[in-house]
Image (cartoon, rainbow, N blue to C red):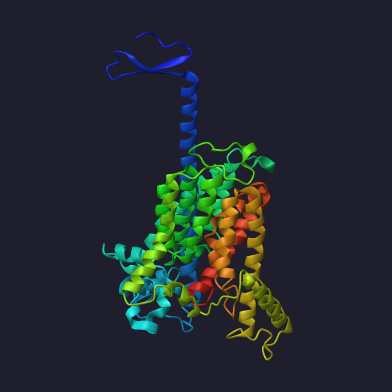
Amino acid sequence: MGPMNSDTAELSSPSGSRPTATIPSATVGLRERLLADAAQARAAAIRDSWRALWRSRLLVLLAGVGTILLFGYGPKRGAFDPPGVTHGFGWLGNLLAASVARWDSAWYLVIAHYGYRPDLGSFTASRDAFFPLYPLGIRSLSWLGLAPIVAGVLLSLCALALALYWLHRLTELELRGWRGRGGADGTSAARLAVLLVAFAPMGFFLSAVYSESLYLMLSVGLFWFARQGRWLQVGLLGALASATRSTGLVLILPALLIYLYGPREDRAPDRPAVMRGRRPAYRLRADVLWLALLLLGTIVFAAALALSGGDALAPFRSQQVWGRHFAGPYVGVWDGLKAAFEGARQLLSAQSQHVYFGAAHGSPSVAAGHNLMLIAFLAVALVALVATFRRLPLAYGVYVLAALALSLSYPVSAEPLMSLPRFLLVLFPLAIAAGAWLAEHPRLERPLLCASSLLMVVFLAQFATWHWVA
């Protein structure tokens, strides 16, 4: 075979007897650079996500153990906690369980062991609000000989590791080519987005026996594969997400937006930009049918309940058992504002004889503090939501807005925004937008992350001692 000239590269057959293709050497160089860039991106994602994972989880472990050693376990305050579910593991086991198994953890562990038992009627109706994939994962790992609580923590940690990795890759993809003030780029924003999630004030839930980390992994993965145009994987992850929590159903909205309007890495738009207007950039093809799988998880859960003698709509009706009611689209925001205003009046009055917010239960001052804390989380989330619409493709902002509709339209009378901080934890587009902003303000990186970590320690201390947090 003749020598390779300066403009082309010959690809030979295994025998080397004759050339089978000739491609420009510039194309070879471009391909090699793209492969090298992809390898660097994967290495950076693994490095940054691993550091965020072990450092944040070490902080959670030390804070949980330290809290119990200093303050004890505290009263259970009427929480559902059957024997042997979150305690009864010996001195060391109970100590380690304090930071990972409280409140809703007991429900997941009971479901993993006993199932939903809809045949028992109202006695087990409370379980129907918890979707089945996470307790099913606990049960599956328990078959390998792991204790249920260990299985739950392992499942959460593995899901968190993959979620942080995918979040890093997705942030770099969306901010590719972006250059912000002070030399900020997509890589720095991706590192910060991962840190903001791992050290979030409610970040300790991501390694607890809760479904947060599993849902986070599935939702971030769905966006990642949608951007690649791999719709079978999108459908499968969406089906698993809708079997993890009710919010998984709204993932069909961003999936459709990315399918129709992009941006997509798999192919060029079918319509040029000048011809689109409001029309989709991509025409419908047969692969759009994979998106129907996103509903499958919830449908299978409802069918299983019905076949077991229960109500197929119980996962949605059971919210009433937990004190939630439909107040109207986003009306919970107004209710939360009123509760926070009355809470401020309660604290400023420095007394508890007169209760300003009559719907609150227990100590008026404690309820006031909760409602003020919840409105503060909502305010920060709304600012981040605006940044999400400004910096990221439309699908990201629509997803956050639709997901928030579920919690902000079904308030709890005593605390209209109850559990909102935990719901916000898994809405990763907010973290991407915040990471991009923080990358442009590097002087604020350490103070903000330290403050967030400190809040996580404080909230974890409350959680470990059976104080309601979110």
Furthest residue in direction bottom, as rendered: 353
Residue 343 visible? The answer is yes
Numbered-mark total: 0
Q: Residue at position x 53%, y 74% from top?
A: 462
Task: Work out whether residue 222 or residue 162 is closer to the camera in this orientation and state it.
Answer: 222
Q: Could you tell me residue 46's position as x and y percent?
A: 46, 45
Q: Could you tell me residue 246's position as x and y percent?
A: 47, 66
Furthest residue in direction top, as rendered: 2
Q: Is residue 56 left or right of residue 333?
A: left
Q: Could you tell me residue 176's position as x and y percent?
A: 58, 40
Q: Is residue 103 left or right of residue 442?
A: left
Task: Work out whether residue 292 or residue 56 is closer to the camera in this orientation and state it.
Answer: 292
Q: Could you tell me residue 5's position as x and y percent?
A: 45, 10
The image shows residue 271, relative to residue 458, as above or below, that is above
- Point out the image quarter for the N terminus: top left
Q: Residue at position x 32%, y 80% from top?
A: 119
The image shows residue 39, relative to residue 320, as above or below, that is above
Q: Is residue 63 left or right of residue 189?
A: left
Residue 201 visible? The answer is no
- Point out the image quarter for the C terminus: bottom right
The image shows residue 176, relative to residue 413, as above or below, that is above
Task: Work out whether residue 69 or residue 327 is closer to the camera in this orientation and state it.
Answer: 327
Q: Residue at position x 45%, y 15% from top?
A: 8
